[in-house]
Image: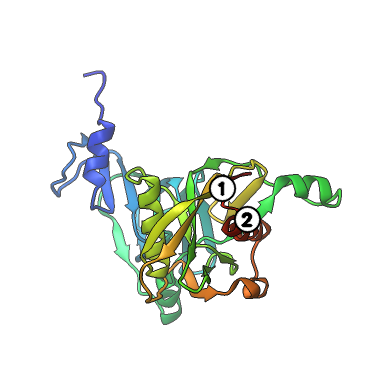
């Protein structure tokens, strides 16, 4: 048999609801995927839908080769205390005898190869400090940039803005209450205030994404009133600590609140209704502040803005 392959759809189906799926190896436990039998190596995918950690352990004989397909992960060497961070596109090897604890950001996927095959995993005790580090949620931070301003207005020795490597349609929502206050959330990843919103998923409609993001981030139900504007400046960038550099592609909608009880999810640290005259007291990045000004202008003119 010159070739044996595993279908992409079958791999994705096998990963659904599972953290790890082997593609090749001499495995003793049953698996949903008809993997390639191999007594020399083990190959598989670790898929972390939620953030979490792998308890401290070492491998007595095997080298672990890993390639980060997406997301971000960190390893703490139990013996030295050193922390190693790997992001999408990074390849690394963990040598036999290395005692480590691993934590991962949500939506992280890693391809791994273990050689030689076999169960040589040894659990390592964790101190309170190491356990606390492992249980601390690994989050990305973000830096909002404008490449045009950075390259034209910065000093000659200043580093150039990063090159965009991602484009994701996003929705932001200007939500008003009955007294004309605007709904703002304080982002955990940047510490700045913004209107609620987020990236569209494959199963989303534009309206559905807007409703879902506002509900998740603020607890508020909404009625959509129209579109305020589109924002697609290729020079407006968001650089995330996991290596993603996303260029702007956002649609800003207007909505009225149909519920009152505020709450916020793990992506924010605060949520507030803000009077228009008080907006200047809430720090925002330049792109967000511009959108808020467009929102206030829209309330008067009801014109769609294209940026």
Q: Is residue 11 above or below residue 241?
A: above
Label of residue 294 in the image:
2
- Mark 1 lies on residue: 229
Instruction: From the viewer's side, name the closer residue of 14 and 86.
Output: 14
Residue, x 38% and y 50% (percent of image)?
207
Q: Name the residue furthest front.
A: 301
Q: Disc 2 versus disc 1: distance between alpha carbons? A: 8 Å
Crowd rating for badge 2 (residues with CA inside 10 Å; few <14, some 14–19, many 20+) = some
Residue 265 appearing in the image: no
Residue, x 64% and y 40% (percent of image)?
234
Q: Is residue 149 above or below residue 12?
A: below
Quick check: marks 2 and 1 in contact, CB under 8 Å?
A: yes
Relative horizontal placement of residue 73, taking residue 276 as reference (left or right): left
SS of the residue under disc 1: strand
Q: Quadrant of the C terminus?
A: top right
The first of marks 2 and 1 along the sequence is 1
Relative horizontal placement of residue 263, taking residue 164 as reference (left or right): left
């Amino acid at each position: 048999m010159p070739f044996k392959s595993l279908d992409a759809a079958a791999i994705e189906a096998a990963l659904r609801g599972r953290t790890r799926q082997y593609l090749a190896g001499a495995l003793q436990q049953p698996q949903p995927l008809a993997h390639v039998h191999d007594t020399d190596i083990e190959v598989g995918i670790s898929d972390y839908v939620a953030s979490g950690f792998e308890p401290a352990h070492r491998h007595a004989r095997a080298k672990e080769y890993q390639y980060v397909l997406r997301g971000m992960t960190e390893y703490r060497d139990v013996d030295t205390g050193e922390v190693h961070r790997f992001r999408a596109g990074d390849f690394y090897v963990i040598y036999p005898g290395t005692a480590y604890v691993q934590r991962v950001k949500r939506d992280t996927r890693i391809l791994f190869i273990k050689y030689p095959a076999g169960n040589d995993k040894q659990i390592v005790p964790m101190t309170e400090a190491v356990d606390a580090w492992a249980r601390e949620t690994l989050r990305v931070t973000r830096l909002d940039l404008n490449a045009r301003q950075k390259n034209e207005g910065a000093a000659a020795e200043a580093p150039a803005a990063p090159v965009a490597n991602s484009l994701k349609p996003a929705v932001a929502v200007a939500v008003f209450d009955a007294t004309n206050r605007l709904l703002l959330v304080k982002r955990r990843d940047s510490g700045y205030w913004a209107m609620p919103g987020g990236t569209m998923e494959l199963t989303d409609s534009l309206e559905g994404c807007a409703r879902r993001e506002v509900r998740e981030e603020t607890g508020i139900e909404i009625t959509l009133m129209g579109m305020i504007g589109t924002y697609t400046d290729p020079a407006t960038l968001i650089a995330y600590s996991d290596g993603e550099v996303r260029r702007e592609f956002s649609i800003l909608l207007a909505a009225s609140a149909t519920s009152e009880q505020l709450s916020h999810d793990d992506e924010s640290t605060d949520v507030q209704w803000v009077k228009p005259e008080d907006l200047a007291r809430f720090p925002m990045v330049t792109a967000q502040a511009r959108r808020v000004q467009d929102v206030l202008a829209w309330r008067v003119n009801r014109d769609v803005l294209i940026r």
